[in-house]
Image (cartoon, rainbow, N blue to C red):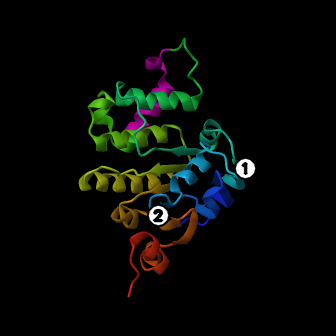
């Protein structure tokens, strides 16, 4: 496991009308590692994601993104586009793609945004060699070259999940947050996603934070598992330690080992 930190969350709180959806959360994400965030529905996982990615502003606390050879950057409360620019990418449980566009056009749109060329109206994208080389590299990295010319709306659910991962990679993040990446997939498609994420982690060095209800995926993929319950972190550790933790069994799995 990587020893350096890429993200530090300190005393994070988010209140909605006096209800603490996130309650004094402290966590550290290792650089270049795969971490899973699990917990029952309503545990606060999605709210925590929204706080990290800027979709919500915290009531209190701090979120610090580490940068290579630079002091950590306080990203608390920054708007989503600023956080993306800082190096955090996110996918959603409901696939966020342009369904009528081809796979290549979807990835190209994300790359154009990352390069700041969305207002460069006079340059034909087909003639932009650096842009198109970057797009083709991402398509190959995710293994969707054979789908490049197909409209996304004609793809299977599993294939659309691959496209969404490609869109996130086009933003060149250092930390990727994935929300239920295998939701609704067959066991075969879920296994493909697990294998792909391992490969991307090794090839790109990106750190991953993944929420997932499929425990087989979680225990096969994550190096560290963080467990939330009622807005708080109740456990964090390696998979085997989490599997046997009585607090986790009681809160999430619904049983306590005898």
Part of the protein shown in magenta: 124-139
Q: Residue furthest front?
A: 17
Q: Which type of secondary structure does the marked residue at label 1 adopt?
A: strand
Q: Which residue is mark 1?
A: 74
Measured as percent of width and height from the top left, residue 128 is found at: 49, 21
The number of callouts visible is 2
| Mark earlier in primary sequence (2, 1) | 2
Magenta segment main secondary structure: helix
Measured as percent of width and height from the top left, residue 45 is found at: 52, 56
- The residue under the point 40% across, 42% down is 94
Q: Which type of secondary structure does the marked residue at label 2 adopt?
A: loop
- The residue under the point 66% across, 57% down is 13
Q: Which residue is mark 2?
A: 39
In 3D space, how far apart are the residues under numbered discs 2 and 1 (Cα atoms)? 27 Å
Q: Is residue 129 magenta?
A: yes
Which quadrant of the view contains residue 11? Answer: bottom right
């Amino acid at each position: 496991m990587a020893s350096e930190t890429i993200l530090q969350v300190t005393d994070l709180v988010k209140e909605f009308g006096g209800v603490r959806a996130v309650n004094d959360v402290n966590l550290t994400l290792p650089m270049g590692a795969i971490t899973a965030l699990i917990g029952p529905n309503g545990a606060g996982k999605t709210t925590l994601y929204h706080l990290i990615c800027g979709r919500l502003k915290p009531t209190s606390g701090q979120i610090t993104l580490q940068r290579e050879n630079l002091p950590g950057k306080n990203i608390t409360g920054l708007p989503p586009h600023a956080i993306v620019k800082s190096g955090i990418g996110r996918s959603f449980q409901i696939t966020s793609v342009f369904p009528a566009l081809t796979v290549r056009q979807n990835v190209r749109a994300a790359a154009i945004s990352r390069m700041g060329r969305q207002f460069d109206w006079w340059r034909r994208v087909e003639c932009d060699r650096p842009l198109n080389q970057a797009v083709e590299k991402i398509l190959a990295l995710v293994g969707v070259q054979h789908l490049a010319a197909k409209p996304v709306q004609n793809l299977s659910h599993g294939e659309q999940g691959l496209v969404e991962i490609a869109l996130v990679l086009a933003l060149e993040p250092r930390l990727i947050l994935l929300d239920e990446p295998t939701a609704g997939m067959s066991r075969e498609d879920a296994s493909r996603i697990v294998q792909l994420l391992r490969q991307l982690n090794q090839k790109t060095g990106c750190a991953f934070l993944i929420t997932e209800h499929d425990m087989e995926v979680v225990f096969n993929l994550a190096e560290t598992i963080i467990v939330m319950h009622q807005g708080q972190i109740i456990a964090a550790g390696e998979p085997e330690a989490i599997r046997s933790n009585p607090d986790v069994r009681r809160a999430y799995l619904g049983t306590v080992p005898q």
